[in-house]
Image (cartoon, helix red, strand yellow):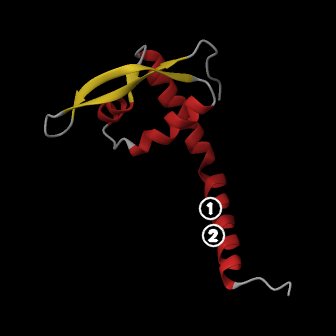
Amino acid sequence: MGMQTTFENDERGNRNARDEAYRLKEPEMESDRAKVYQEIVSNDGITLKEIADKWGCPPNCISGRITELKNDGFIIADGKKYLPNYKGKMYPHTIYKATAGGFSH
């Protein structure tokens, strides 16, 4: 009975490939994390949308780094700001501020 199904083999292969891709991308992500943190510090609070607009990239390029910084306690959510979407409709966006501890990469 100890045979693995094709699905289990595929899942393990997918996990290994994902882990390897993450390992290769990690130094770049760490650098991006430092850039996002510095942007938040420099602006004494800023939204993800404002960073994305300022940098000319889509929000999903930044959201992962925001989540990491928040989970690691380097930034906190500190209120909301209403900003327009591309059609001019106003939507709430979370303002992020740095915590007192600082960030070192």
Q: Quadrant of the C terminus?
A: top right
- Numbered disc 2: secondary structure: helix
Q: Which residue is mark 2?
A: 14
The amino acid pointed to by label 2 is Asn
Please tell me which residue is depicted at 38% across the width and 22% down the height of the picture.
46
Image disc number at residue 72: none
Residue 54 x, y percent position in the rendering: 31, 30
Q: Quadrant of the N terminus?
A: bottom right
The amino acid pointed to by label 1 is Arg
Between 28 and 10, which is closer to the camera in this rendering? 10
Q: Is residue 87 above or below residue 37?
A: below
Q: Is residue 95 above or below residue 53?
A: above
Res 52 quadrant in image: top left
Taking 81 as reference, is 104 left or right?
right
Q: Which residue is mark 1?
A: 18
Between 78 and 41, which is closer to the camera in this rendering? 78
- Numbered disc 1: secondary structure: helix
**Figure label count:** 2
Please tell me which residue is depicted at 48% across the width and 30% down the height of the picture.
36
Residue 12 x, y percent position in the rendering: 70, 71
Between 19 and 75, which is closer to the camera in this rendering? 75
Label 2, residues with CA under 10 Å away: few <14, some 14-19, many ≥20: few
**Tags 1 and 2 in contact by the CB under 8 Å rule?**
yes
Q: Is residue 97 above or below residue 12?
A: above
